[in-house]
Amino acid sequence: DADVTQTPRNRITKTGKRIMLECSQTKGHDRMYWYRQDPGLGLRLIYYSFDVKDINKGEISDGYSVSRQAQAKFSLSLESAIPNQTALYFCATSPGGTAETQYFGPGTRLLVL
Amino acid sequence: RKEVEQDPGPFNVPEGATVAFNCTYSNSASQSFFWYRQDCRKEPKLLMSVYSSGNEDGRFTAQLNRASQYISLLIRDSKLSDSATYLCVVSPPGGYNKLIFGAGTRLAVHP
């Protein structure tokens, strides 16, 4: 079984709808991240969390919110989806401390019409 | 200026070729450096870390030049399975496990 899972894997929604992307991990890592990837651009950090009570904005947090329900779960919400939020979304985890390697989930492909 | 810049490619090379990718970063205080590999429509995966003294992992060699703020990846004896996008990744000062990703360089190895 995969260590980092994301649901759904693909989603089509309409402008103005609220949607939630979910991420779960079995790696036991404290740190979790949400990124989006657009063609021709690097992955960009949306939000990150270093433990259950810690939430931090990343580079492009406007229009997004997150919830860290447990060490293993980190959800990303689009309160009112817009077409320019069409992208590939990745969740990632890292053990923290001096270890900086991040482990990515398989991604969620989102299309906002 | 982008924080991490890479030539997008694509680099089209025959099997067995040697190919090199370059990457520059803007923040001279950056702490750690990595190459990740991303297959089409898949998640990025760590290929290797990049150390100041340079490091090698099989057919892959990574180099770091802090003075020029430049990172390189050399792939020798290219295989068809090396076809992927290679992401240059930098950890900014203060770190906190935050990573800055380049847009990637695409490699296509053909028979």
Image (tube, rainbow, N blue to C red):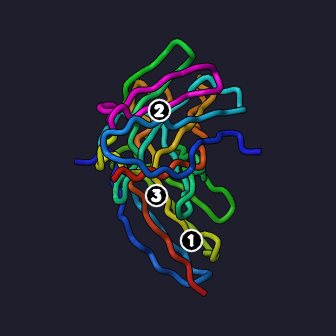
Give me the C-alpha separation between circle 1 and circle 2.
31 Å
> Does label 2 lie on the same chain as label 1?
no
Q: Residue A32's image quarter?
A: top right
Q: Residues within 10 Å of mark 3 (few under 14, many from 20)?
A: some
Q: Is residue A53 magenta?
A: no
Mark 1 residue element:
loop
**Residue type at tag 1:** Ser
Confirm or deny contact between disc 3 and disc 1 (CB under 8 A).
Answer: no
Q: Residues within 10 Å of mark 1 (few under 14, many from 20)?
A: many
Q: Chain of mark 3?
A: B
Residue A36: x %, y % from top left: 42, 44
Confirm or deny contact between disc 2 and disc 3 (CB under 8 A).
Answer: no
Residue A97: x %, y % from top left: 59, 22
Q: Which residues are magenta?
A: A60-80
Q: Is residue B102 visible?
A: no
Q: Which residue position holds label 3?
A: B72
B85 lies above or below A98 = below
**Residue type at tag 2:** Leu
Mark 2 residue element:
strand
Residue B78: x %, y % from top left: 61, 75
